[in-house]
Amino acid sequence: MLIAHDPSTVSKPVSLFAHAIEVPPHARWLYVSGQVGVGLDGKMRDGIEAQCEQAWRNLFAIVEAAGMNKSDLVRVNSYLVDARDVAVFRTVRDRLLAPTRAASTLVVVRALASPQWLVEIEAVAAKG
């Protein structure tokens, strides 16, 4: 079982994430490469909300294929190319990820590997 740590000596997280996650000994670890808004049909989804949803669904599918689920997520790193999309990203993340509270970092970058990509999400999961 993963244990969230949000000590009272640090301000509360601003959204649905934990400051730290503790993994039990002898857990299986899964490192998920960055996922983007491309569906199973190979097509890029239109707009930031649709790309966020698809990237999360891709990530969940990979985690589930490894015999885990979103509650096993330890760490999530997310990258956006436009700071104006932070609110949309957080709304989609909170809706799809709830009630899981992984440790999380969100970074706004100049560009991702393809100019069509508006968001990329990578993760680490562990199951005891």
Image (cartoon, grey):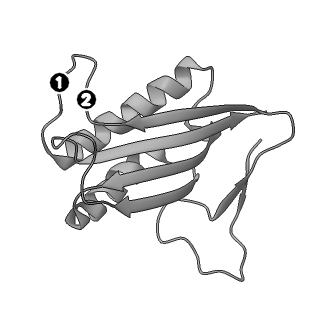
Q: Which residue is mark 1?
A: 43
The local crowd at label 2, few if under 14, some if 14 to 19, many if 20 or more residues have their Cα within 10 Å, is some
Q: Which residue is mark 2?
A: 38
Instruction: Please tell me which residue is depicted at 48% across the width and 51% down the height of the picture.
Output: 77
Q: Under tag 2, what secondary structure?
A: loop
- Does the rendering let one see residue 118? yes
Instruction: Please tell me which residue is depicted at 16% across the width and 41% down the height of the picture.
Output: 116
Left or right relative to 93: residue 52: left
In the image as oriented, which residue stretches furthest toward the left? 46
In the image as oriented, which residue stretches furthest toward the right? 25
Left or right relative to 19: residue 121: left
- The C terminus lies in quadrant: top right
Amino acid found under the numbered disc labelled 2: Val
Q: Nearer the viewer, residue 80 or 112?
A: 112
Query: How much space separates mark 1 and mark 2, taking CA atoms?
Result: 5 Å
38 to 98, vertically: above or below = above
Left or right relative to 42: residue 101: right
The local crowd at label 1, few if under 14, some if 14 to 19, many if 20 or more residues have their Cα within 10 Å, is few
Residue 32 percent across, percent down from the top left: 52, 33
